[in-house]
Image: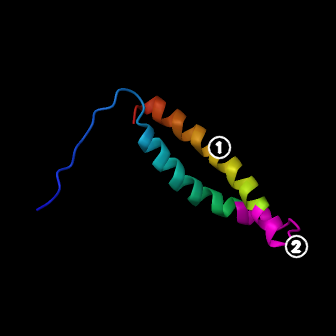
Amino acid sequence: MTPEVTRTETDGIDYGWVMQVTFVLTIFVGTPVVVLLSVPATLPTWTDRALFAVGIGSMVWFIVAILVFLYARRTHV
């Protein structure tokens, strides 16, 4: 017996979709960006490395979130 799937019709932006796509794209885009930017950086301790990754990752997340939101608003995903 399979569970019943409920569907909703959204008027405007599907914020659940925006959050899911932002999460996935931030991982796929953010990881290589952090790695590439960390190569020339001097990060002697684990604390320095973590703070660097969080700082770059938060900027990537913010940019990706804005771009995904604008895409969803334009296309009514």
Taking the spot 10% from the left edge, 62% from the top edge, the residue there is 1
Magenta residues?
A: 34-50
- In 3D space, how far apart are the residues under numbered discs 2 and 1 (Cα atoms)? 27 Å
Magenta stretch holds residue 47: yes
Check residue 44 in the rendering and tell me which mark sits there, or answer none.
2
Q: Amino acid at mark 2?
A: Pro
What amino acid type should be assigned to the residue bearing mark 1? Phe
Return the residue nearer the eye: 74 or 14: 14
- Residue 76 at what x, y percent from top left? 40, 31
State which quadrant residue 28 falls in: bottom right
Q: How many marks?
A: 2
Residue 61 vertical placement versus 38 (above, below): above
Q: Mark 2 packing: few (<14 Cα in 10 Å), some, or many (20+)?
A: few
Residue lying at 59% horizontally and 38% vertically, measured from the top left: 66
Of the pair 54 and 24, the residue shown nearer to us: 54
- Left or right of residue 19, residue 31 in this image: right
Residue ID at (67%, 50%): 60
Residue 75 x %, y %: 43, 32
Task: Bin the neighbour count of mark 1 within 10 Å (Cα to Cα): few under 14, some 14-19, many 20 and up.
Answer: few
Q: Residue furthest left?
A: 1
**Mark on residue 62?**
1
Rendered residue at 21%/49% (across/down): 5
Q: Is residue 29 left or right of residue 55?
A: left
Residue 27, image x and y in percent?
58, 59
Q: Could you tell me which secondary element the residue under label 2 belongs to? A: loop
Specify which label sits upstream in the sequence, 2 or 1.
2
In which quadrant will I find the C terminus?
top left
